[in-house]
Image (cartoon, rainbow, N blue to C red):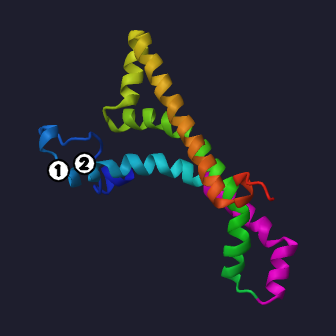
Amino acid sequence: MVFSVYLHWFPIGLSVPIGQLSDTVTFWQWLYRLILPAMTLSIVGIASLTMYTRDKLINVKKSDYFLFAQARGESFWGIIKNHGIRNILLPAISIQFLSFNELFGGTILVEQVFAYPGIGQATVAAGLRSDVPLLLGIVIVSTIFVFVGNLLADIIYQYVDPRLRGEDDE
């Protein structure tokens, strides 16, 4: 409401301007119309991730090894980089990739609010028409989406924390 109706910074909705064919829309027009829906989807996920990360970083700052690193003379940002980020990165990755299912559900809401054609409108239409094959296909696609998110998290874990690689020390 604020950014589109009151401030007139962004269009209210629709992926294509009224009276224009989708073939004639430039990439920049499409991207401009995608800003509000993308911000709507990302702000919800960023809020919980930021709150969790902030809480864990405060706990790390109160820990003994943080105080010991300060006593050794390390800079504040060096301690945060070497000790803080390392300890909060794995849980932050978990939270980020666990929210993939929320992201998928949020797209349904965002597509309805901003009048975007997509999987959200297809889900609503399939539910209203009792189109079981389409609903089943959407469920399978969303399941694969969440599975790929969890797989990416597992792969990233192994790069972030070498202890998780499972290499035997011989």
Say which element carries label 2.
helix
Q: Is residue 146 magenta?
A: no
| Residue receiving disc 2 | 30
| Label 2 environment density (alpha carbons within 10 Å; few <14, some 14–19, many ≥20) | some
Q: Residue furthest right?
A: 64
Q: Residue at x 38, y 52 (%)?
A: 2
Give how far across and how far down residue 18 sits, in percent: 16, 39
* Residue 55 seen in the figure: no
Give how far across and how far down residue 79 sits, in percent: 72, 78
Amino acid carrying label 1: it is: Thr
Rounded to the nearest whole Å, what is the CA distance between mark 2 and mark 1?
6 Å
Give how far across and how far down residue 124 sits, in percent: 41, 21
Q: In front: 141, or 54? A: 141
Question: Secondary structure of the magenta portion, mostly?
Answer: helix
Give how far across and how far down residue 115 sits, in percent: 32, 34
Marker disc for residue 66: none
Asked where in the image residue 20 lies, by quadrant, the reply is top left
Look at the picture and state if 76 lies above or below 104.
Answer: below
Q: In front: 151, or 83? A: 151
Q: In front: 168, or 124? A: 168
Q: Is residue 84 left or right of residue 47?
A: right
Look at the picture and state if 23 lies above or below 76.
Answer: above
| Residue receiving disc 1 | 26
